[in-house]
Image (tube, grey):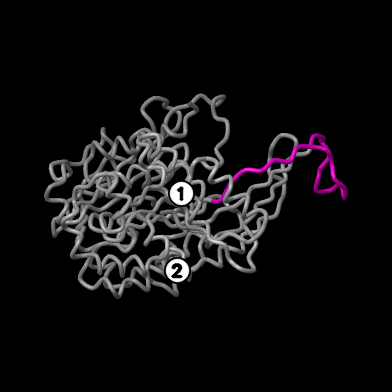
Amino acid sequence: MIAVDGNLSEVGLTSVLRQSIQDNVQGMGLVESTQSFHTTDLLHSSVFVSTSLHAYCIHMLMVHSEPTSVTKSTRILPAIASSLHRLQSDLRAPVSFASPNLLELKQLYTHARSEPLELTSHDHWWKVIDNFALGTQYRQELELLARRDADDHSGNKGTLAYLVDQGVAQMAVHLLPFFQHLVIKCGEFGIFAVFRIPQKAAKTSPWVNERSNIKERHIVAHGKDGEILVLKHFPALVLPPEDILNVTGAGDTLVGSVLADLAQAPTAFEDPSTLDLLMSRAQKVLLPH
Amino acid sequence: MVVGSAAIDIISQADTSEDPLQSKSTLPGKVSTSLGGVGRNVAEAAHRILTATSSSLTRASVLVSPIGKDSFGRMLAEETNRIGMRNDGLTEVENGRTAVCNMILDRTGNLIGGVADMDIIQEFKPEMVCSMRHSY
């Protein structure tokens, strides 16, 4: 599993992505037989194991809160653009995971659809979005989710209205052709995970039996070709203000936890219970202990 | 494998209420260093979690990052090793300065200025990843 810091230059990011795609293609033959593995195998063959279970296992780490770097979080986009022509009929996203905060999500979305990249005009984008087949039911479910409280314990944080009002859900879904899983860091509003489970994995995934459940804070949509789309909100852990020492690096630590869990269980997102555990651990790792 | 930035953070905090950025002179206070860089922070967090689960995973998390052939580079390599993380992904480059983020805080701890020297990240070469993968 390769995680890439958004600080790299465009050239750097492109080369890592290209190399990983190339390796994935080369590793195809070996990949199917290594579905189950022990941790020692992980150390030797993680490249092949992880690329079998995700298209191109690259977790993008986004730079956060640097006032001068408006465009840093978008440096991955040219790399994605140059990889799209290699995907052909494979509808999986070139980047497996990305963990932007709300500002970075907006920057990514804006840059993806604007000139000169115009990634949302690409064939690949249309095919993926079309396959989602999101209609009235999805929109209604999203409206209902937006009315949910931001967290279940303190009523004074407001609701999840920002998912609709600020277009967060829409932007995230529209980036899914490029990022297979988005773990959106919403600060005190918790984490909003938006991700795709490809058709093959979907057949055996427990998500296939799940329906949207507003109380559980998730929306599940079943796409035309059997792909599953999930949007799930995880409220932030409640901490008394006096216990908050320092938020510097909190995003990095959270991402480190997600990575560690994914390295050991690359399909954690494909099961609601392992996903919940992964998120809960990622949030708890920030607590003083 | 985490590919990204590794840096040294140097934090200067003046003891007095005078503004260190206006004084045209040095003021007494505390200067401390810590390891920083988004990629490095993530690699360390992943390392701590992986090693808490199993002692066979001490080399599972590797940070691939360019460093300079300078004191800060040596400091990064040594301090990384000191916390039990492998440092063989820290690759020295010619003519590069190890990334340093120099921050100035006021007495209450707010960031009021500083200089971030991150140029070295442009020196990242894909070969650094390739050679790591063979030994991974």
Above/below status of A216 relative to A109: above
Instruction: Residue type at mark 1: give it.
Output: Asn
Look at 49% across and 57% down and name the residue there: B4
Q: Amino acid at mark 2?
A: Glu
Magenta span of residues: B15-37
- Horizontal side of B20 relative to A81 (left or right) equals right
Quarter of the view holding residue B121: bottom right
Question: Which residue bears the numbered disc 2?
Answer: B127
Q: Which residue is drawn at the image coordinates 64% and 47% (left, top)?
A: B9
Tell me the distance, in whole angstroms, between the alpha carbons under discs 2 and 1. 30 Å
Q: Quadrant of the N terminus of chain B?
A: bottom left
The one of A259 and A248 positioned closer to us in this rendering? A259
Secondary structure beneath dot 2 equals helix
Q: Residue at x 56, y 67 (%)?
A: B122
Dot 2 and dot 1 within a common chain? no
Q: Nearer the viewer, residue A199 or A57?
A: A57
Q: In front: A165, or B34?
A: B34
In the image, residue A109 lies at what x, y percent?
A: 41, 60
Per the image, label 1 sits on a secondary structure element best described as loop
Assign the C terminus of chain B to one quadrant of the image: bottom left
Chain for numbered disc 1 = A
Cβ atoms at labels 2 and 1 below 8 Å apart: no
Image coordinates for residue B133, horizontal then vertical, percent? 38, 61
Indicate the position of residue B115 as horizontal and vertical percent values. 70, 55
- Taking the spot 49% from the left edge, 41% from the top edge, the residue there is B84
Name the residue tied to disc 1.
A101
Q: Is residue B99 left or right of residue A157?
A: right
The prevailing secondary structure element of the residues shown in magenta is: loop
